């Protein structure tokens, strides 16, 4: 006889996306979602306690006089099954994290619950592309490539124009395309390589360094500028270093003031849950929403 | 083989076989009591060591007086068989004699001179060799008299040690009364040694007087459960000490209701000595420069101040004065309005203050006027401020039109904030959150 809590637990299997705020460690996000799921599970009514036979001294019935006390049997719930003694029904829910985001970045973070964790690992290892929005600022260079770090040098940036920035980005993109072709292990002189490249289906096999498949500038307002990046196999530190290198190529220096992930594989920012929605019912809805996409993705990759 | 010194009753050396860790181990037939310290070496396991004496205490209680004598006699018989088993494990005569001496020496429980006599005799004889041919056991179909029927005792299946309190709750008066009060036994048994302590308590001697004291003090009965869950050691503190501390607090002109409120909010309060409480009250009055009335008010609202260490509080005060640059009277106002600032995390406090003062450009005087912002969550302040800035409504100067006060910024729930302060919808706010 399954209880309500067990039935709910069996439904908690799948993947969902969460919007991680900036400044928060990803572990905190994972722990908050796990404790919210546990709260929902443990708020379900506990199973009925076992009854035990106890002889109690009760006053006798109508037959005996009122002064008689008689040992009469009664079924009493055992205290050993009381929720204050047994504790909560569930202690742990397996919540796993996909491709991690460091504390400085914000954006889409994929979490998996229960059986979804197996799929998560698959998703993580597979070469899904991720979309980022990078905010940069010209004029200074710091030790950790962010605007909060210790400033190492300051430069002027009056000579930087959108035209020069675009040229630098095109050069970087070219280098990355070459790397993509090399790591995708296709022979450049074949027809099939051309077909794949035309359709944009080239992707790196096996281990590869971070590769940018797409790069463009969406906002330019010196000293601030914004880049949009699609990449494979990256870390957020690499992306901040990219901003720094863009600055170097333009004969100035630049720091990164924000890294925001807008897409992680099939999980987009529109469907990511904000902090108010990290509760069990929103999570279950999100899992149901993403279920067809993750199933399709597994089929494609396998 | 190891010798352990038993906790109860002084230096009785007891022999035991290899220490077993887990619940209700039926192979562990030695009637030995093991000191809990052994299990401190095994950090992950929490084992309740209910000694045989306690198990027998538990067993003997619920039975009526008429049956008591016979059950004790049967206990002796049970112990005798256990001793016989233990002789198979012992290698030295020495330790076995210690065990029997001990038996003779504790008359209150076992009460048996005949038991000691029975034990001292047979080491040299073959007591442990059972003669299978002897027709000692009656047939189960044999008719027996009423007195013999009444003497048949089914030994209770209480395990001598267990990692949870579940097997003991129904048998122990203390534990069942605590559960009925609302004490969360599951939480308490996670803490090392607390479970054993609770099982050893005697309800009428230890627990009831303290509960009556707390009730006289004015602590509500519904709160008693939570109080004991947080601080079970109030039951092991002596009654005189508790009364002395309560009278000390009353002598400092704390009213009865405030003492009750303080004890409910800070369950460990009455475990601290009078000197320590005195020291802390003196510190707060001197350092903050508040009048006696205001100090009492602050301490009543946050009695945790009297429980913890003073070093973090001194650091926080220094931070407020030097790093933030608040003046003396501003600090006094902040502390009397929001005492939590004194025990807040220094790093988080600095982060919030830095954001409010440098990014939101709010002057010191305004922050001192609304010190609740220092207590709020940083992420909340940041997101709401950036949303207002995006909408062009980030106006925190009281002299300008469309002024938004800091407490409304922080303490309104999301829907009310969006509709009244930001004049936007909740969906807009969520969409904006995803762009940060």
Image: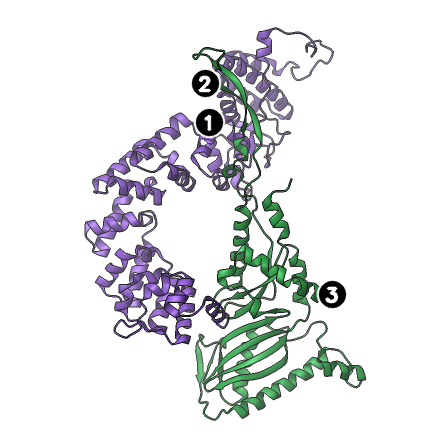
Q: Residue at position x 39%, y 30% from top?
A: B207
**Label 1 residue SS:** helix
Residue B78 got which mark? none
Vertical order, A283 against B52 (above or below): below
CA–CA distance in space, label 1 to label 3? 61 Å
Residue receiving disc 3: A299
For disc 3, the chain is: A
Of all residues, the one furthest to the left in this rendering is B291
Q: Can residue B350 be spotted in the picture?
A: no
A96 lies above or below A108? above
Q: Earlier in the sequence, mark 2 or mark 1?
A: 2
Q: Point out the image quarter for the C terminus of chain A.
A: bottom right
User: Residue B69's spot in the image, x, y percent?
Assistant: 51, 13
Tag 1 residue: B173
Query: Is label 2 in a helix, a strand or a loop?
Result: helix
- Tell me the distance, in whole angstroms, between the alpha carbons under discs 2 and 1: 20 Å
Residues at marks 2 and 1 touching, judged by CB atoms closer than 8 Å = no
State the count of labels: 3
**Residue B355 position in % (x across, y down):** 37, 70
Q: Answer whether labels 3 and 2 touch (C-beta < 8 Å).
A: no
**Callout 3: 10 Å neighbours few (<14), some, many (20+)?**
few
Chain B colour is purple
* Picture residue at 59% right of the left edge, 79% below the top: A229
Q: Residues within 10 Å of mark 2 (few under 14, many from 20)?
A: few
Q: Which chain is disc 2 placed on?
A: B
In the rendering, which numbered label is found on residue B108?
Answer: 2
- Whether labels 2 and 1 belong to a single chain: the reply is yes
| Relative to B310, B85 lies left or right | right
């Amino acid at each position: 006889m399954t209880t309500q809590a067990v039935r709910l637990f069996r439904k908690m299997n799948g993947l969902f996306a969460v919007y991680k705020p900036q400044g928060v460690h990803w572990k905190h996000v994972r722990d908050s979602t796990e404790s919210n799921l546990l709260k929902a599970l443990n708020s379900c009514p506990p199973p009925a306690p076992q009854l035990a036979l106890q002889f109690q001294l009760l006053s006798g019935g109508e037959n005996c006089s009122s002064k008689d006390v008689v040992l009469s049997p009664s079924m009493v719930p055992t205290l050993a099954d009381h929720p204050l003694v047994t504790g909560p029904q569930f202690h742990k829910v397996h919540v796993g994290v996909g491709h991690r985001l460091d504390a400085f970045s914000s954006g889409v973070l994929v979490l998996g619950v229960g059986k979804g964790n197996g799929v998560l690992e698959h998703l993580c290892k597979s070469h899904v592309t991720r979309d980022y929005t990078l905010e940069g600022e010209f004029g200074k260079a710091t030790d950790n490539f962010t605007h909060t770090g210790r400033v190492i040098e300051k430069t002027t940036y009056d000579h930087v124009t959108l035209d020069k920035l675009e040229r630098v980005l095109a050069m970087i993109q070219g280098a990355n395309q070459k790397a993509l072709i090399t790591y995708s292990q296709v022979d450049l002189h074949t027809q099939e390589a051309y077909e794949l490249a035309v359709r944009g289906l080239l992707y790196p096999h096996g281990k590869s360094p971070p590769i940018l498949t797409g790069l463009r500038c969406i906002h330019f307002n010196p000293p601030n500028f914004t880049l949009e990046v699609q990449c494979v196999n990256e870390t957020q530190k690499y992306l901040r270093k990219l901003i720094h290198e863009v600055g170097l190529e333009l004969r100035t220096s630049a720091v990164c003031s924000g890294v925001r992930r807008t897409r992680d594989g099939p999980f987009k920012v529109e469907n990511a849950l904000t902090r108010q929605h990290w509760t069990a019912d929103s999570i279950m809805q999100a899992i149901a929403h993403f279920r067809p996409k993750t199933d399709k993705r597994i089929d494609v990759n396998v | 083989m190891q010798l352990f010194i038993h906790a109860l009753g002084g230096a009785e050396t007891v022999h035991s076989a290899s220490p077993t860790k887990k619940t209700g181990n039926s192979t562990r037939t030695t009637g030995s009591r093991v000191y809990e310290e052994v299990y401190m070496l095994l950090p992950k396991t929490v084992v309740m060591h209910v000694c045989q004496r306690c198990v027998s205490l538990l067993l003997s209680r619920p039975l009526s007086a008429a049956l008591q004598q016979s059950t004790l006699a049967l206990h002796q018989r049970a112990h005798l068989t256990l001793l016989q088993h233990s002789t198979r494990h012992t290698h030295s005569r020495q330790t076995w004699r210690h065990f029997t001496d001990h038996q003779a020496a504790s008359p209150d429980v076992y009460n048996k001179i005949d038991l000691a006599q029975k034990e001292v005799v047979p080491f040299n004889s073959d007591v442990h060799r059972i003669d299978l041919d002897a027709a000692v056991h009656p047939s189960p179909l044999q008719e027996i008299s009423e007195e013999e029927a009444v003497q048949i005792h089914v030994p209770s299946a209480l395990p001598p040690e267990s990692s949870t309190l579940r097997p003991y709750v129904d048998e122990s008066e203390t534990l069942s009364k605590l559960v009925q009060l609302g004490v969360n036994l599951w939480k308490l048994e996670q803490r090392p040694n607390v479970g054993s302590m609770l099982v050893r308590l005697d309800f009428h001697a230890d627990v009831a007087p303290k509960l009556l004291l707390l009730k006289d003090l004015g602590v509500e009965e519904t709160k008693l459960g939570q109080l004991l869950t947080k601080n079970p050691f109030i039951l092991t503190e002596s009654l005189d000490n508790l009364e002395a501390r309560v009278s000390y607090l009353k002598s400092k002109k704390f009213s009865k209701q405030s003492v009750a409120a303080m004890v409910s909010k800070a369950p460990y309060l009455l475990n601290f000595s009078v000197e320590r409480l005195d020291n802390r009250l003196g510190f707060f009055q001197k350092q903050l420069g508040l009048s006696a009335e205001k100090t009492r008010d602050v301490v009543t609202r946050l009695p945790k101040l009297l429980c913890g260490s003073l070093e973090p509080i001194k650091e926080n005060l220094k931070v407020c004065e030097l790093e933030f640059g608040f003046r003396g009277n501003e600090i006094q106002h902040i502390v009397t309005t929001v005492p939590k600032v004194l025990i807040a995390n220094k790093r988080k406090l600095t982060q919030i203050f830095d954001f409010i003062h440098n990014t939101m450009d709010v002057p010191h005087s305004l922050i001192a006027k609304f010190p609740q912002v220092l207590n709020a969550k940083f992420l909340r302040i940041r997101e709401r401020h950036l949303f207002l800035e995006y909408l062009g409504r980030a106006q925190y100067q009281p002299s300008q039109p469309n002024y938004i006060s800091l407490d409304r910024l922080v303490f309104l729930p999301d829907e009310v904030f969006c509709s009244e302060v930001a004049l936007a919808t909740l969906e807009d706010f969520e969409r904006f959150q995803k762009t940060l």
